[in-house]
C-alpha cells in the first residue's frame, strides 16, 4: 500500500499503528490519489482476426452455443488482471454456428455487437429481431432480453463490447435466464429502424430510457451517411472523417456508458496525434493501415481489433481507403463530467 520510499521514514512506526486501524496517512500516497494527469491503464494491443478466427471456430466444434451459453473469446488486455480489453470495457469475439441459438438472457451490463462475418442471423432484443449483416451495429441495453440465432450457412461472428468492468466496479451486477431459449417476437424485423431512425419519431411515443431507442444501425446506412456527409469537406487533422452513432431523441450516445463511432481515413491520410481520457477499441471494417498508440506501432487489416488505453497518444495512418469502427467509455465519462481530450499530444 505504501510506496517503497516513504516521504517521512521516521514516521514508519506510527504508520503501522494507523494501519492497524484500517487507515492510511494520505500524505504518503497523495500522488496516487490526486495525480497531475492520467496514467494509461493497460497497454495498446491488437487481436488479428485471422489468428483469432481459427481457435474460435475450433471452439465451435467442441462446445455448443447452448452449452457455452455464450461462445466468446474474451479479448484480455495483456497488462490487466481482469478479463477486460481496457480498465472499463469488455470486448470479445462471439461465434454462433449455423442453426444454433445462443439462449435468451438479460443482465445489467449494456452491450453492443459489431458484426464481422455473417451469412444470415439476428440478435433479438425485447421482442424485436435486429438483423446482423457484416458491419451492422446492434445494441442490447441494460436489462433487455436478448438471444442470438444464426440463420445462414456459415459462421456468424461479431465483436461484443460491454460495460461489464464498470458495472462490476459499481457492484451493480444482476443477470437472469429467460424461461425459453428464444423470447417471443412482438414486432417486425429491424422495427426500431423506421420507428426511430428515419429523422422522424412516432407521434406521442415515449421512450423514457437512458439509451437510444434505435437498436440497430445498419452498416449500409451508416457508411453511406459517413461518405456523403463528409463529401467536399477537408478531413479533420486528428480524425479524418468521423461520425458518432447517435441517439435520435437527444443526439446523445447509443448507451449511457458506451459511445460508438465510424471513421473514414482516405488512402495515405495520416492523423495528427490525439489523446483522450476514454479507452478506445477499434475495428478495421475496410482497408488497412498503421496505428501508433503511445510507443506501440500496430499494423492493422480488415476485421482486426485493437485497443488504445486512456490518455495514450493515438496517430492513425491509412494505407488504403480505410473505415474504422470504434467504441469507448466516453458516454460514461461525459455523464460523470470527466471526459477530456488533448489535441497536441506527442506520441
Ligand atoms: Fe448477454
Image (cartoon, rainbow, N blue to C red):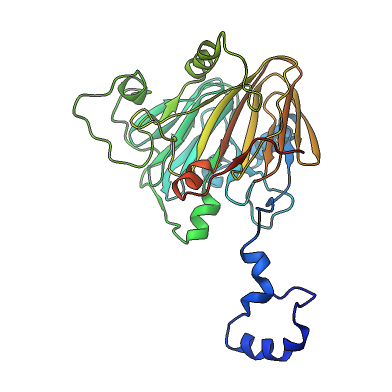
Considering depth in this image, is 164 or 20 the residue closer to the camera?
20
Q: Is residue 340 left or right of residue 255?
A: right
In percent of width and height, residue 37 lies at 66, 53
Question: Residue 216 occupies which quadrant of the picture?
Answer: top left
Q: Is residue 91 left or right of residue 141?
A: right
Quadrant position of the C terminus in the picture: top right
Considering depth in this image, is 29 or 58 the residue closer to the camera?
29
In percent of width and height, residue 328 lies at 56, 40
Q: Is residue 165 above or below residue 226?
A: below
Q: Residue furthest top?
A: 232
Q: Is residue 226 above or below residue 116?
A: above
In percent of width and height, residue 66 lies at 51, 43
Say which residue appears at 43% left-offset and 29% top-offset: 246
Residue 63 shows in the view: no
In percent of width and height, residue 230 lies at 55, 14
Say which residue appears at 57% left-offset and 12% top-offset: 233
Say which residue appears at 47% left-offset and 16% top-offset: 221
Q: Is residue 285 above or below residue 339?
A: above
Considering depth in this image, is 230 or 324 the residue closer to the camera?
230
Considering depth in this image, is 13 or 158 the residue closer to the camera?
13
Q: Residue furthest left?
A: 204
How many marks are shown on the rendered structure?
A: 0
Say which residue appears at 32% left-offset and 23% top-offset: 188
Quadrant position of the N terminus in the picture: bottom right
Residue 186 shows in the view: yes
Amino acid at each position: 500500500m505504501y510506496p517503497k520510499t516513504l516521504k517521512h521514514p521516521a514516521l514508519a512506526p506510527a504508520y503501522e499503528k494507523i494501519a492497524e486501524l484500517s487507515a492510511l496517512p494520505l500524505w504518503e500516497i497523495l500522488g496516487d490519489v490526486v495525480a497531475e494527469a492520467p496514467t494509461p491503464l493497460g497497454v495498446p494491443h491488437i487481436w488479428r482476426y485471422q489468428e483469432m478466427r481459427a481457435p474460435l471456430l475450433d471452439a465451435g466444434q467442441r462446445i455448443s452455443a447452448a452449452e457455452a451459453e455464450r461462445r466468446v473469446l474474451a479479448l484480455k488486455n495483456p497488462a490487466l488482471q481482469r478479463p477486460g480489453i481496457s480498465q472499463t470495457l469488455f470486448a470479445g469475439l462471439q461465434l454462433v454456428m449455423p442453426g444454433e441459438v445462443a439462449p435468451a438472457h438479460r443482465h445489467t451490463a449494456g452491450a453492443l455487437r459489431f458484426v464481422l462475418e455473417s451469412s444470415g442471423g439476428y440478435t433479438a432484443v425485447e421482442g424485436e429481431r435486429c438483423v446482423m449483416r457484416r458491419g451492422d451495429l446492434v445494441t442490447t441495453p441494460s436489462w433487455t432480453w436478448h438471444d442470438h440465432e444464426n440463420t445462414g450457412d456459415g459462421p456468424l461472428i461479431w465483436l461484443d463490447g460491454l460495460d461489464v468492468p464498470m458495472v462490476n466496479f459499481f457492484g451493480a451486477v444482476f443477470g437472469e435466464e429467460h424461461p425459453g431459449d428464444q423470447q417471443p417476437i412482438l414486432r417486425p424485423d429491424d422495427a426500431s429502424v423506421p420507428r426511430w431512425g428515419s429523422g422522424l419519431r412516432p407521434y406521442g411515443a415515449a421512450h423514457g430510457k437512458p439509451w437510444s431507442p434505435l437498436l440497430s444501425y445498419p452498416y449500409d446506412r451508416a457508411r453511406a451517411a459517413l461518405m456523403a456527409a463528409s463529401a467536399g469537406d477537408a478531413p479533420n487533422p486528428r480524425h479524418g472523417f468521423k461520425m458518432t452513432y447517435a441517439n435520435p431523441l437527444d443526439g446523445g450516445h447509443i448507451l449511457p456508458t458506451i459511445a460508438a463511432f465510424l471513421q473514414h481515413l482516405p488512402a495515405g491520410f495520416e492523423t495528427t496525434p490525439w489523446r483522450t481520457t476514454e479507452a478506445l477499441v477499434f475495428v478495421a471494417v475496410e482497408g488497412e493501415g498503421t496505428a501508433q498508440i503511445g510507443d506501440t506501432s500496430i499494423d492493422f487489416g480488415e476485421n482486426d481489433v485493437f485497443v488504445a488505453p486512456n490518455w495514450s497518444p493515438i496517430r492513425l495512418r491509412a494505407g488504403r481507403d480505410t473505415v474504422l469502427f470504434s467504441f469507448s467509455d466516453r458516454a460514461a465519462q461525459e455523464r460523470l463530467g470527466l471526459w477530456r481530450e488533448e489535441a497536441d499530444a506527442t506520441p
